[in-house]
């Protein structure tokens, strides 16, 4: 029997749209500016968006199950501030506990996990709308961040702590400048790799996709939907807390506004990376493409001397373009299906009007 | 026939939940905080609530039509920057201060211009959503990024102080001692309350939000209605931008940032459902009052301003949990199944069509 | 027509339901029903809507609890029937609209929740694909397991759902109208798959309105009517007319109205064709006339009804309303031309459930209720609402009641009120009595009668042939996209058996 066989090349391109964008942007900036391809710059691309990348990862997780978590930007801020308070002396604005950095990192990840747990339980067990719960949490956590902050930024972290966000693993010296392999960059790549393996190659990861594709069908297949969603929110919270640690480490400072208003750009990156807010679609690697695209645009426009304020504009326009392509794809598939359905029938051949738009 | 009974009483209370809360709040704050019910303080509550209030109207319209407008705060930023840019004299941008374009247009020209700009932005949203079948959540999200970026690019991230007095009248002026912004906001609520409850347009918005297919079969054009809703939302956001800039007399980059979340929260606390087709403008007004009163009370109680956000978030959270219990009580016949509703069904069209091939034939164009 | 076939089923009883009764407030949905299925047979279950098929299957699946009766599987009586015990007993249900994980691959759908892992505990995708492909080929099902389910045709999805049930050790699979959305090619594909499974000893219960298909695929057939089992026959012992006779029974007509047809033709169509839906459709309705159209799903009747109201494309051909050319491109245009339509899916198209009775009644006439500047005239609106609540006997605490709190019959009356308020010339009713109780049915018949007395030409699209006979002056039968027969009260040939036969594609009438 005849099968819907939309043009393979077209569908391959549509499925990997993000990589076309990434490569296109990369080539465009290489041509437009000779400084873009410098080793220093390439090393920097990931470092600058490490924290952003972790937030995208958190949203990629929630998106797969058909949820989202707006509060992650505040979790980032709270984790950074809390960590700073516990790390530094009272003179530098901290609490003077001067805890061991490793302990602080662990505590913060646990804190992120608890925030996620709270979100997840409210959404699944209490039945509050996920958008509103996470908006409210966004306020609460941001407020708490302001509340516990000494009002100024906190800096002078121990070296062990800043290594995570700002450290260097290796430095390759070239004629053109140094290529810096940053710890944060490696961590982000590792996190996305682990995320990819987790969502692609574990039972739990596949259960996430099943929940996002159709919660009822997943339930019928014996999957504990609530449990999956709660765990996903916990993972998102941990990722966000980790993002906070990276950010604080890179800047060697924590301010109460850290991460504020990032969330929509984060969603944009995940969506252009092929994730769907309706769940069950996209993959972590694509989301990583979204992060790359965002930071290439960021660095590229920056190098070309374009005002940084145009970056948001370009992101928004790209996102609009991607949604438009998606809408066109849906329409195209629809038309193919109609045409196939009609190809089998002889009824009503008088009607030559084949405008299905 | 149903008898009035306990069920009806509960239904009544849950429908008008926000008013019960509002009265309770007034009584508690009035008794515990000195001068809370004084004229000056009430004026203060209303002034600070007015910008939020104007934006809540637009957002409520969108929510009632089962949509969402995340771009409204971007519109606020952009129109404020554009207005200042067009009105202020030219000057070199130094560290944090910028001048205008140099055309120094009269506020009377600028005001209609920015209102039209807002309406056009809203129209563009609506057009993309209804005519190009793009997902409303992502469209308005992307629009927000574009608008905010444009605002920053035009202002170069700097403040533009000193907007003309005529322009500031809406945000900062007074008529017979009453702030113009408050009068304007109350006026807008009256107008839109009337439109939504007593005019054909309002009826259509509710119908489209509750059931788009049935609305079409009742002889409405959902596309036209939703595009109008977004146009109104953009227009009102521009008005809010005008009001806010007028109050501050200085264009600040990132003006209005983070407002959207407050706006949605106020509307939902006021009983406007994310699932569309329900809620009233007057209820949304109560939601705005509630948020404004809480903010004010937290101020007066000398709560560290840094904690205000946290407390406000907690209050919203509690309200939402109570609301979730309410819809649970109403049961499946009621208005709600929780979660995953904001996004609507818009983006599911791909799989939906595949699932019901018998519906493959598109309905004739609206 | 009834072909004899040898099939592999034995006489061993797999499922035995005895004396099942179930009543709801005011309705005896099942009365002392005995139903049995043998191992490896395909057992047809037929009957009109509301005959009790779905209640019986609900009991079998453990979704509904029977008031009395026993269920035995392979001679073992089940003590407690819950959905889980029924699944464990090997009973599976494949609904008309299948729930699968659309965004995932076929392979993952088959193995969901229990994917094969390699020695590191990670999902082994090669094994997933090979394993699922092997399972499918064991069933003789040719599908690319790497494909996304959303790219499958309906027939393929149905087969996949059956396959999934089999992988879960199903022994008896209930197929609910599996062919409703299929083309002939796909039906053949599905049937050969089902027969292949039957050879392996799997039993099927096949629920369908398409009697031809029942004869094509089933070994035995059980007929239900009014909550009772009328009888079970081996397929080669009976023919379509015999089956129709069992389905219809010899009961009296439920309702009868006198003709109110005038002379003037107000609604006319000539050579109406739409690709893939219907062709060469001609009709002419006179003032006050009530005409029924009946046809199975896929006969084009649904598309015709929606096309005539502008909900779908109408195709080519001419339609006239009151002598004027009529070409609706939207429901709004249809209302303006004087055509009103009662949709089949009341919840999707008819009613805005969150809103009040008043708002629902006046939606389609808002244009007439606005004063200056688009302000609604409250008084007129209330009067209109009260008038129709009164006229149609809508039982509601008041005009402000949300319609979702009304009973099915009253909801339908609200939709009627909305249509009647537009004072239409032509009324198209699509399954007007679906899901309403007996009393509301009579009320609705009276409403139809009142409207046609006032001169409204009414077209009723319905599968309830008996009701049509009581109401209509003429009845058209649609089959394969064409109007194949016309029955009329004047010719005194409106016999339920004949009409049902024609619906099934029975002998063509020469002068149709």
Image: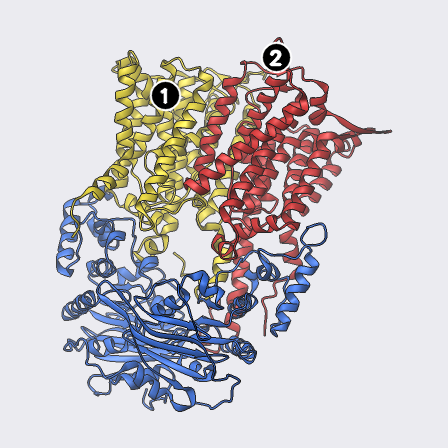
Along the line of sight, the residue nearer the viewer: B356 or B327: B327
Is B214 above or below relative to C49? above
Q: Position of residue C360 (x, y in %)?
A: 25, 53
Left or right: where does residue B255 sit relative to residue C362?
right
Along the line of sight, the residue nearer the viewer: A341 or C12: C12
Q: Position of residue C465 (x, y in %)?
A: 27, 78
Residue shown at 55%/22% (left/top)?
A: A257
Label 1 CA crowd tier, 10 Å (few <14, some 14–19, many 20+): some
Along the line of sight, the residue nearer the viewer: C8 or B229: C8
Label 2 CA crowd tier, 10 Å (few <14, some 14–19, many 20+): some
Along the line of sight, the residue nearer the viewer: C470 or C381: C470
Residue at the extreme top: A91
Residue shown at 77%/33% (left/top)?
A: A34
Give the secondary structure at mark 1: helix
Give the secondary structure at mark 2: loop
Q: Is residue B27 visible?
A: yes
Colour-to-chain, yellow: B
**Residue that badge 2 annotates:** A96
């Amino acid at each position: 029997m005849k099968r819907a066989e939309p043009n393979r090349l077209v569908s391959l391109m549509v499925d990997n749209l993000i990589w076309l964008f990434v490569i296109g942007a990369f080539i465009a900036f290489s041509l437009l500016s000779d400084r873009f391809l410098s080793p220093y710059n390439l090393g920097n691309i990931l470092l600058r968006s490490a924290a952003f990348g972790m937030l995208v990862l958190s949203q990629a997780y929630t998106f797969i199950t058909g949820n989202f978590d707006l509060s992650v930007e505040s979790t980032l801020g709270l984790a950074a501030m809390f960590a700073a308070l516990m790390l530094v002396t009272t003179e530098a604005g901290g609490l003077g506990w001067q805890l061991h950095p490793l302990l602080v990192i662990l505590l913060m990840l646990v804190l992120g996990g608890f925030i996620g747990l709270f979100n997840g339980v409210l959404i699944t067990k209490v039945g509050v709308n996920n958008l509103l719960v996470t908006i409210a949490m966004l306020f609460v956590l941001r407020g708490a961040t302001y509340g516990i902050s000494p009002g100024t930024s906190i800096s002078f972290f121990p070296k062990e702590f800043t290594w995570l966000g700002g450290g260097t693993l290796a430095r390759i010296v070239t004629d053109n400048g140094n290529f810096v392999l940053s710890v944060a960059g490696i961590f982000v790549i590792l996190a996305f790799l682990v995320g990819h393996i987790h969502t692609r190659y574990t039972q739990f990861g596949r259960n996430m996709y099943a929940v996002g594709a159709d919660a009822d069908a997943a339930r019928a297949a014996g999957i504990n939907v609530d449990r999956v969603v709660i765990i996903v929110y916990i993972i998102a919270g941990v990722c966000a807390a980790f993002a906070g640690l990276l950010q604080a480490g890179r800047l060697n400072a924590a301010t109460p506004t850290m991460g504020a208003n990032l969330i929509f750009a984060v969603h944009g990156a995940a969506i252009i990376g092929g994730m769907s807010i309706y769940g069950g679609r996209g993959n972590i690697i694509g989301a990583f493409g979204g992060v790359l695209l965002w930071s290439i645009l960021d660095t590229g426009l920056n190098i070309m001397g374009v005002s940084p304020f145009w970056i948001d504009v370009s992101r928004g326009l790209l996102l609009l373009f991607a949604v438009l392509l998606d809408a066109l794809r849906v329409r195209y598939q629809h038309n193919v299906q109609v045409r196939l359905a009609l190809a089998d029938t002889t009824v009503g051949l008088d009607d030559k009007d084949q405008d299905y738009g | 026939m149903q008898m009035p009974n306990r069920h009806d009483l509960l239904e009544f209370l849950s429908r008008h939940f926000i008013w019960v809360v509002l009265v309770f709040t007034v009584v508690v704050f009035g008794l515990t905080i000195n001068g809370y019910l004084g004229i000056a303080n009430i004026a203060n509550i209303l002034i600070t609530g007015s910008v939020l209030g104007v934006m809540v109207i637009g957002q409520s319209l969108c929510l009632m039509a089962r949509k969402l407008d995340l771009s409204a705060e971007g519109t606020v930023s952009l129109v404020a920057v554009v207005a200042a840019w067009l009105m202020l004299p030219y000057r070199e941008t130094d560290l944090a201060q910028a001048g205008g374009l140099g055309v120094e247009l009269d506020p009377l020209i600028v005001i209609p211009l920015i209102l039209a700009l807002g309406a056009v932005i809203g129209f563009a949203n609506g057009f993309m959503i209804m005519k190009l079948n793009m997902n409303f959540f992502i469209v308005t999200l992307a629009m927000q990024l574009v608008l905010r970026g444009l605002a920053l690019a035009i202002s170069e991230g700097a403040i533009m102080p000193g907007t003309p007095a005529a322009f500031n009248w809406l945000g900062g002026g007074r008529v017979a001692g009453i702030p113009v912004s408050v009068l304007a906001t109350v006026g807008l609520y009256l107008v839109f309350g009337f439109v939504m409850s007593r005019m054909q347009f309002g009826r259509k918005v509710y119908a489209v939000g509750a059931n788009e297919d049935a609305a079409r079969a009742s002889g409405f054009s959902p596309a036209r209605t939703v595009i109008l809703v977004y146009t109104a939302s953009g227009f009102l956001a521009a008005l809010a931008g005008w009001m806010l800039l007028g109050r501050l007399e200085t264009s600040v980059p990132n003006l209005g940032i983070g407002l959207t979340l407050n706006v949605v929260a106020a509307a939902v606390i006021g009983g406007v459902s994310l699932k569309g087709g329900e809620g009233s403008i007057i209820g949304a007004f109560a939601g705005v009052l509630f948020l404004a009163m809480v903010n004010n009370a937290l101020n007066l109680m000398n709560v560290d301003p840094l904690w205000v956000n946290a407390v406000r978030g907690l209050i919203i959270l509690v309200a939402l949990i109570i609301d979730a219990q309410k819809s649970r009580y109403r049961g499946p016949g009621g208005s709600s199944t929780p979660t995953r509703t904001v996004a609507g069904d818009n983006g599911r069209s791909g799989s939906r069509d595949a699932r019901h091939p018998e519906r493959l034939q598109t309905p004739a164009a609206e | 027509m009834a072909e004899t076939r040898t099939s592999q089923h034995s006489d061993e009883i797999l499922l035995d339901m005895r004396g099942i009764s179930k009543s709801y407030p005011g309705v005896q949905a099942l009365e002392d029903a005995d139903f049995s299925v043998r191992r490896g047979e395909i057992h047809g279950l037929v009957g009109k809507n509301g005959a009790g098929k779905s209640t019986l299957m609900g009991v079998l699946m453990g979704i509904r609890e029977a008031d009395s009766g026993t269920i035995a599987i392979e001679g073992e009586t089940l003590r407690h029937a819950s959905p889980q015990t029924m699944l464990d007993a090997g009973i599976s249900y494949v609904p008309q609209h299948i729930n699968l994980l659309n965004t995932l691959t076929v392979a993952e759908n088959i193995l969901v929740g229990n994917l094969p892992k390699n020695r590191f505990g990670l999902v082994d995708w090669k094994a997933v694909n090979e394993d699922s492909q092997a399972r499918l080929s064991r069933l003789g099902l040719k599908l690319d397991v790497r494909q996304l389910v959303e790219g499958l045709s309906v027939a393929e999805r149905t087969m996949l759902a059956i396959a999934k049930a089999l992988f879960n050790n199903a022994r008896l699979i209930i197929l609910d109208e599996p062919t409703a959305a299929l083309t002939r090619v796909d039906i053949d594909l599905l049937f050969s798959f089902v027969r292949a499974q039957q050879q392996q000893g799997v039993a099927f219960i096949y629920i369908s309105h398409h009697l031809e298909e029942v004869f094509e695929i089933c070994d035995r057939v059980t007929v239900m009517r009014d909550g009772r089992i009328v009888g079970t026959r081996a397929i080669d012992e009976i023919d379509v007319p015999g089956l129709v006779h069992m389905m219809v029974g010899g009961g009296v007509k439920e309702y009868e109205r006198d003709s109110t047809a005038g002379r003037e033709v107000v609604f006319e169509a000539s050579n109406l064709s739409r690709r893939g839906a219907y062709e060469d459709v001609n009709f002419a309705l006179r003032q006050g006339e009530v005409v029924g159209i009946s046809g199975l799903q896929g006969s084009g009747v649904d598309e015709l009804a929606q096309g005539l109201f502008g909900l779908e494309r109408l195709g080519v051909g001419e339609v006239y309303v009151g002598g004027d050319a009529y070409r609706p491109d939207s429901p709004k245009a249809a209302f303006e031309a004087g055509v009103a339509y009662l949709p089949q899916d009341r919840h999707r198209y008819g009613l805005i459930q969150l809103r009040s009775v008043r708002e629902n009644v006046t939606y389609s006439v808002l244009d007439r209720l606005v004063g200056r500047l688009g302000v609604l005239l409250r008084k007129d609106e209330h009067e209109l609402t009260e008038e129709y609540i009164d006229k149609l006997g809508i039982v509601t605490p008041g005009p402000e009641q949300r319609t979702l709190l009304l009973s099915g019959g009253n909801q339908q009356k609200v939709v009627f009120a909305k249509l009647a308020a537009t004072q239409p010339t032509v009324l198209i009713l699509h399954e007007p009595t679906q899901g309403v109780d007996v009393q509301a049915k009579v009320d609705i018949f009276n409403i139809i009668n009142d409207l046609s007395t006032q001169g409204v030409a009414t077209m009723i699209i319905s599968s309830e042939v008996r009701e049509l006979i009581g109401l209509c002056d003429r009845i058209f039968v649609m089959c394969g996209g064409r109007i194949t027969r016309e029955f009329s009260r004047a010719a005194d040939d409106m016999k339920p058996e004949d009409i049902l036969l024609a619906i099934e594609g029975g002998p063509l009438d020469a002068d149709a």
